[in-house]
Amino acid sequence: MAVAIRNSNRVVTSFIQFSRFFSSGSFDPPPLLPHRRVVVTGLGMVTPLGCGVESTWKRLIEGECGIRTITPEDLKMNGFDRETQLHTFDQLTSKVAATVPSGANPGEFNEDLWLNSKDHRSIARFIGYALCAADEALRDANWMPTKQDEKERTGVSIGAGMGSISDILDASRMIYEKNLRRLSPFFIPRILINMASGHVSMKYGFQGPNHAAVTACATGAHSIGDAARMIQFGDDVDVMVAGGTEANVDALSIAGFCRSRALTTKYNATPEKASRPFDCGRDGFVIGEGSGIMVLEELEHAKKRGAKIYAEVRGYGMSGDAYHITQPHGDGRGAILAMTSALRQSGLHPNQVDYINAHATSTPLGDAVEAKAIRSFFGSHAASGALALSSTKGATGHLLGAAGAVEALFTTLAMHHGVAPLTLNLDKPDPIFNGGFMPLTASKNMTINAALSNSFGFGGTNCCLLFASID
């Protein structure tokens, strides 16, 4: 997440000196290590813009927004009395969120299918979102293996940033009321983050690697990158179901982020304007929920079965700021190191990158530092206007542990459809932008052969995924 907590006037020092060592002009990709190539063959998502890839993508590129004003009923405090619910709601300084639309209509998340039956008692909402998105991705990839060896060579890597905080709040209430006998025997399985991967593997019988990253708001990206490496450098897996999921639009999560002054507070009356990446009027992020899942596959395995191929995973860069628990380093070194690593692994030059889906969460310092890092690393390529840049969080809000995965899907879809999505609510760009270096304010039809997706998290964790077209 790396949301800068209200230091909008902070002077960024030593940035120019540091960036001299990381610029596209001196970039020389090293020889590639021998590895198996990994491609994307299936996509699935549940987002505030809709349930499903088609509805989400359509609304995204058309400039629609999935953010709304919340009510006391959104806080998931059903076990508390009405007075406590209303008092809690009144104390929240941020009253907007990006929630998944629920219902039985097309484009809506059907809770009866994924959450509400007796068979779903061990499934918290974040797990249900992952199951729904994984089902779409597997169907899109046409990968429903029945042979034992195929199941053994299919794994799952789905992470979450926070798990089910609402379940923890409800359990705490039972302790306070001295009524622990009412605690569900499914409490622990509902809150464990690796249970999203566990449920997907059990549903489809996948017996390959079963993995779950937990790296705050870089979780989804790390989960995809880890899965790709398992295929690239391993010999025991051909297919991975990978991504991130989150469902923390609840009282305790919102209150916690409010107390850290990370959430927007200026736009409670105009929720569709609340998330404003790179805009001068930004004042914090909008909490969101959802899930993004990819099917990753070894290239020859995909070709052999005639699978549709969206893109190739060419680079996976990671770094740590080693600086602050919530703020990015002012000189952008963590972002630059992660982008450098992703590019060096890919064998591509920075000038070959056509589009960047930025992490930009709509926080004062975080957006500015990322923009400076991109401008520094890509140099004249960024200044020329040839590098398209946008943040999709203006439409979706910040999906926390699911953000990196959903945005990796957006990046892949941008390549597949030849459309770079816009940055919503960018009315007055941050002064860091000038000339050709400017985020998109309208979706742009363009050929995208290589694209980067940035994801950064609390604790200074940074992840960049580089996707490229198949040659």
Image (tube, grey):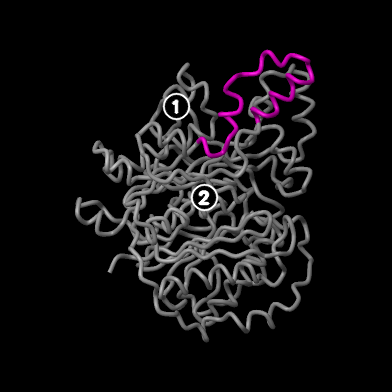
- Residue 444 is marked as none
Q: Amino acid at mark 1?
A: Trp
Q: Is residue 196 above or below residue 16?
A: above
Q: Which residues are magenta?
A: 166-195
429 on left or right of 389: right
The magenta stretch spans residue 188: yes
Q: Is residue 271 above or below residue 302?
A: above
Which residue is denoted by mark 1 in the rendering?
Answer: 114
The magenta stretch spans residue 159: no
**Which x, y percent locates residue 281?**
69, 57
Of residue 430 and residue 331, the one placed in the foreground of this image is: 331
Sequence-earlier tag: 2 or 1: 1
Which residue is denoted by mark 2 in the rendering?
Answer: 220
41 on left or right of 3: left
Of residue 452 and residue 185, the one placed in the foreground of this image is: 185
113 on left or right of 260: left
| Among the 4 quarters of the image, the one containing residue 459 | bottom right
**Which x, y percent locates residue 41?**
31, 51
**Which x, y percent locates residue 246?**
56, 40
Q: Residue shown at 53%/77% (left/top)?
A: 378
* Dominant SS in magenta: helix
459 on left or right of 443: right
Of residue 239 and residue 380, the one placed in the foreground of this image is: 239
Q: Residue shown at 58%/47% (left/top)?
A: 214
Q: Residues within 10 Å of mark 2 (few under 14, many from 20)?
A: many
Q: Amino acid at mark 2?
A: Gly
User: Which structural element holds mark 1?
Assistant: helix
User: Which structural element holds mark 2?
Assistant: helix
